[in-house]
Amino acid sequence: MSYSTFSASSHDATLEPMFFGRSVNVARYDRQKYPIFEKLIEKQLSFFWRPEEVDLSTDRKDFMALPEHEKHIFLSNLKYQTLLDSVQGRSPNIAFLPITSLPELETWFETWAFSETIHSRSYTHIIRNIVTEPSEVFDQIVTNPEIVRRAESVTRLYDELIELVNIHTVHGAGTHTIDGKTYDTSEYNLKTKLYLTLVSVNVLEAIRFYVSFACSFAFAERALMEGNAKIIRLIARDEALHLTGTQHMINLMSSGRDDADFKQIAEECKPQVVDLFREAAEQEKEWADYLFSQGSMIGLNARILGDYVEYITNVRMKAIGLEELFPVRTNPLPWMNSWLVSDNVQVAPQESEISSYLVGQIDADVDTEDFDDFDL
Amino acid sequence: MSGIPRIKVNHHHTFYYQYEFSLLDALEVQEIPAQYNCRGGYCGVCKVRLIDGEVEEVQDILVDLADDEILTCSCRPKGHIEIELPE
């Protein structure tokens, strides 16, 4: 299976599975196997925003006045968010595009990853506005051991999938020994790796991101760093869409509707999937301890954030048909909801109240009768 | 089936729909604790099970739903309905 940027075969893409079928030929959306991805693309496009639209001048003053331990919480959280979006801005394209077989799914990946690049640009916008020397913040992302440890577990499956697909592209299916390491590039093993990678992406977007959002919104609940919260709110709106997309793929796969192999893979991988959720939840709790190691802030401490980790992990596991991992509890941060409601997101005045602002929308529903009262 | 739609909710009371925008709004008016996040039909947090009756969409739903599942933020009852909120 060598990747072709334009496969000239005349096959009907609607008969292909989502992944590991024939490469996409024409990017056409008149016939779709899964119209849901087109809907997601449209929604994502309607959400378009730019970080420069949000004014951060008050945030700078707020930040200067924060006590040291709250500066630590704010900056560490921002660094973690920067890491997550650095990964998400490129990885879906690199990992999934070469193995995708449906045009609408291919375009969803590109639309999704593009919106992550806007998030990355937002972090630069925020950091540039609140500190004098942005490099001091950015440089620590690759040197801070707490963040580096997270990066490893966020990217491991992505990297393994990319490596395996590359070896498969060059050497074909089978068992290959390269530099003393053995790789199983059978189709079944590739599919297993893909399934696990999608779960790990889901964990990243549906749990890790939300823990970081909670910290950003906790400042704004005290009327601090509100520009930042405005940006994070737009990011959260995008992430909700991305995680729905990933849940869709996972559910389509594990039901066996798309490709019968995945039904068995999902069943076999269940223990590993649960481990991915457990590992992320544990790491996020450790992260909460690190964030609040120098002191808590009003409204949020390591224990409450840890409870939120457990709560959100349960919600996300249920969404892909898994048993809850932690004792059932109600949302320990009920105020999060008001920050996650999409219709309250306000970008520019003309866009207030509506989430999908359409540029140049016209009323095409005009009847000849409408001209009856015109006289010449 | 005619008249004002009646909504039956497990562990809570049965009430009449007062033509709120969505089923979620109707539940909130009744002070029934219903989960939600985005209210835009894409996060899936407000998912409940429709045990009986029919609903109609009031906005696009982007979440993967089983046959008997509905998003309270994105639909309203067409007639009498019975729903089951998650534990």
Image (cartoon, helix red, strand yellow):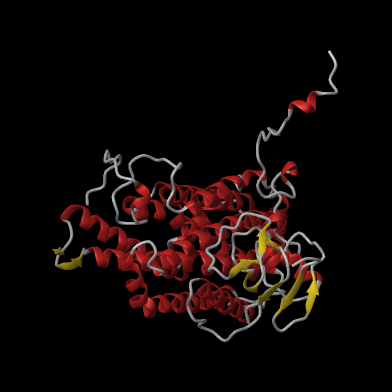
Residue A330 percent coordinates (x, y): 66, 80
B10 sits to left or right of A86: right
Residue A156, visible in the rendered structure: no
Residue A110 percent coordinates (x, y): 44, 47
Q: Is residue A77 above or below residue A290?
A: above
Q: Nearer the viewer, residue A367 or A298?
A: A367
Residue A375, visible in the rendered structure: yes
Image quadrant where residue A31 sits:
top left
Q: Nearer the viewer, residue B66 or A316?
A: B66
Quadrant position of the C terminus of chain A in the picture: top right
Q: Residue at x 64, y 53 (%)?
A: A231
Residue A202 percent coordinates (x, y): 47, 66
A77 sits to left or right of B58: left
Residue A364 percent coordinates (x, y): 68, 32
Q: Is residue A5 above or below residue B26?
A: above
Q: Nearer the viewer, residue A218 or A195?
A: A195
Image quadrant where residue B81 sits:
bottom right
